[in-house]
């Protein structure tokens, strides 16, 4: 079992095809798999359905794949801050399935855990509920939402070991554990590859069973959308 | 004199009780963090996976891996824990968060909330707002009393698509505060901004409420 690949291209080799569904970790531009997104751009894969909370910005994150028109549908909770996205959406070149953020996280979690559907109160009585089955529990109405399983998942972690065990850092964890679990094939890029046994077993966030290939991230720009600081006078 | 944004945030902060876990929305609600009473211990949650939000960082403390749901850089505290988005929304959906303070485009007299889309305009998506109003135990809305065209935002019924139905417990506008004891009761006018009177509020409000 050799999970570590020498390059992102090698890590995606044989695992991309036109019309595929790709799940990506990240919230805004935080914790996004920058290296693998670039490799997906280079792969030329077309007609991708992307499961991702956000759509990046014009020239960074999933915005890179929107620019090249490689994405035909997004399943997301919030897609602001991206002019190219807006243009393609208004021109009906791009389809969007809006999903409330917590429902999206749970759909990915459920898909990874073998749960095809679950009921939630989120979205009851709104446009999100249109066409969905409902059921009443204890006098309250709930919506049936479906689990999501992706052909490929790409995630970003802080540290990974040769077994594919991953540790994330601070709020860069976000959707990455669910993305890793919901992929039929999951590739992780990590800021640091550590040796066997170097990760504390009690501290592993994503166990290696969810990660089929691992590559050292070569892009760690970590662009900040809203740099907000306070002054020193406290 | 209408209340300023900071005064509205300060009024909202008076509802914070010791030990509360609170989620603050983007915009004016974020300002509430500046007015938490000194003798009240509150833990702020951010739905991207942080329980225990600290203040904005000093310039040399900025960490790209540490942002809030508004994508602003922040800091951690000695109580901070990080979770995945699924666990974070488990806290929200599971009813573990005591209070959420959100912005709104419209609120109806039965507590329906609209704050995520305007038909015909570019829709950015609901983000976490639908999850918050469905799961958090108590919802306070901070909004202007009327929109830019002077139209009342506290209405008989929402004209915009719903974020949630019958989910709002309290409304703080720049002119007045409305509140209801439970979600079967009508809203009651509780407080009026200095220089305004009940008759003026009535004229600028479409919703039915008690006085």
Image: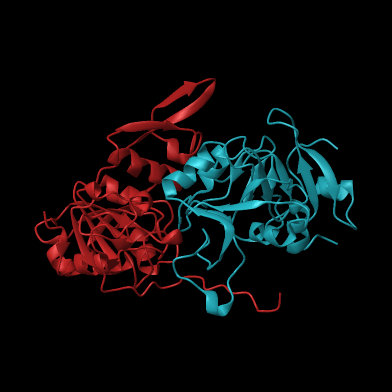
Chain colours: A red, B cyan
Residue A24 appears in view? no
- As drawn, the residue found furthest toward the front would be A197
Instruction: Residue at 80% x, 60% y: name it.
Output: B3
> Considering the image in quadrants, where does the C terminus of chain B appear?
top right
Hey, which quadrant is residue A34 in on the image?
A: bottom left
Residue at 32 percent across and 58 percent down: it is A199
- Residue B137 pos. (x, y %): 62, 37
Which one is nearer the viewer's eye here, A98 or A209? A209
Vertical placement of residue A143 versus B172, above or below: above
Q: Nearer the viewer, residue B2 or A211?
A: A211
The N terminus of chain B, quarter of image? bottom right
Residue found at the far top of this picture: A138
Q: Is residue B98 visible?
A: yes
Q: Residue at x 39, y 46 (%)?
A: A105
Which residue sits at x=49%, y=51%?
Answer: B119
Front-lying residue, B59 or A90? B59
**Above or below: residue A46 compared with residue A98:** below
- Horizontal arrangement in the rendering, residue B4 relative to residue B20 (left or right): right
Tell which of B99 and B148 is nearer to you: B99
* Residue B198 to residue A188: above or below: above
Total marks shown come to 0
**Residue A32 drawn at (x, y percent):** 34, 63
**Image position, residue A37 (x, y; %):** 26, 65
Q: Is residue B71 left or right of residue A52?
A: right
In the rendered image, which quarter is residue A79 located in?
A: bottom left
Q: Position of residue A60 (x, y in %)?
A: 34, 71
């Amino acid at each position: 079992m050799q999970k570590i690949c020498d390059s992102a291209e090698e890590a995606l080799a044989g695992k991309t095809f036109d019309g595929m569904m790709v799940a990506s970790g990240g919230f805004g531009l935080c914790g996004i798999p920058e290296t693998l997104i670039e490799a997906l751009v280079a792969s030329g894969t077309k007609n991708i359905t992307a499961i991702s909370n956000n759509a990046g910005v014009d020239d960074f994150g999933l915005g890179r794949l929107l620019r090249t028109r490689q994405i035909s549908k997004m399943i997301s909770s919030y897609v602001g801050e991206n002019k190219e996205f807006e243009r393609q959406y208004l021109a009906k070149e791009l389809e969007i399935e809006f999903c409330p953020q917590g429902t999206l996280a749970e759909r990915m979690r459920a898909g990874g855990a073998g749960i095809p559907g679950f009921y939630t109160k989120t979205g009851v009585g709104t446009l999100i509920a249109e066409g969905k089955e409902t059921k009443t529990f204890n006098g309250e109405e709930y919506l049936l939402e479906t689990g999501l399983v992706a052909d490929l998942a790409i995630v970003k972690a802080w540290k990974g070991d040769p077994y594919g065990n991953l540790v994330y850092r601070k709020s860069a964890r976000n959707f990455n554990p669910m993305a890793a679990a919901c992929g039929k094939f999951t590739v992780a890029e990590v800021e640091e590859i550590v040796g066997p046994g170097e990760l504390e077993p009690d501290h592993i966030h994503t166990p290696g069973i969810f990660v089929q290939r691992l590559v050292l991230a070569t892009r760690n720009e970590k662009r900040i959308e809203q740099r907000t600081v306070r002054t020193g006078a406290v | 004199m209408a209340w300023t944004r900071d005064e509205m945030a300060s009024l909202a902060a008076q509802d914070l009780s010791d030990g509360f876990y609170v989620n603050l929305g983007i915009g004016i609600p974020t300002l509430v963090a500046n007015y938490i009473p000194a003798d009240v211990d509150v833990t702020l949650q951010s739905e991207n996976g942080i329980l225990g939000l600290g203040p904005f960082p000093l310039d040399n403390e900025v960490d790209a891996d540490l942002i809030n749901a508004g994508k602003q850089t922040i800091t951690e505290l000695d109580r901070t824990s990080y979770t995945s988005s699924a666990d974070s929304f488990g806290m929200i959906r599971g009813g573990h968060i005591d209070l959420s303070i959100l912005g709104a485009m419209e609120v109806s007299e039965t507590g329906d909330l609209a704050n995520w889309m305007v038909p015909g305009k570019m829709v950015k998506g609901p983000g976490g707002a639908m999850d918050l109003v469905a799961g958090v135990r108590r919802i306070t809305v901070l909004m202007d009393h009327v929109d830019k065209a002077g139209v009342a935002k506290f209405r008989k019924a929402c004209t915009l698509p719903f974020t949630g139905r019958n989910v709002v417990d309290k409304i703080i506008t720049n002119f007045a505060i409305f509140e209801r004891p439970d979600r079967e009761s009508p809203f009651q006018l509780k407080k009026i901004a200095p220089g305004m009177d009940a008759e003026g509020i009535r004229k600028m409000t479409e919703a039915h409420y008690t006085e």
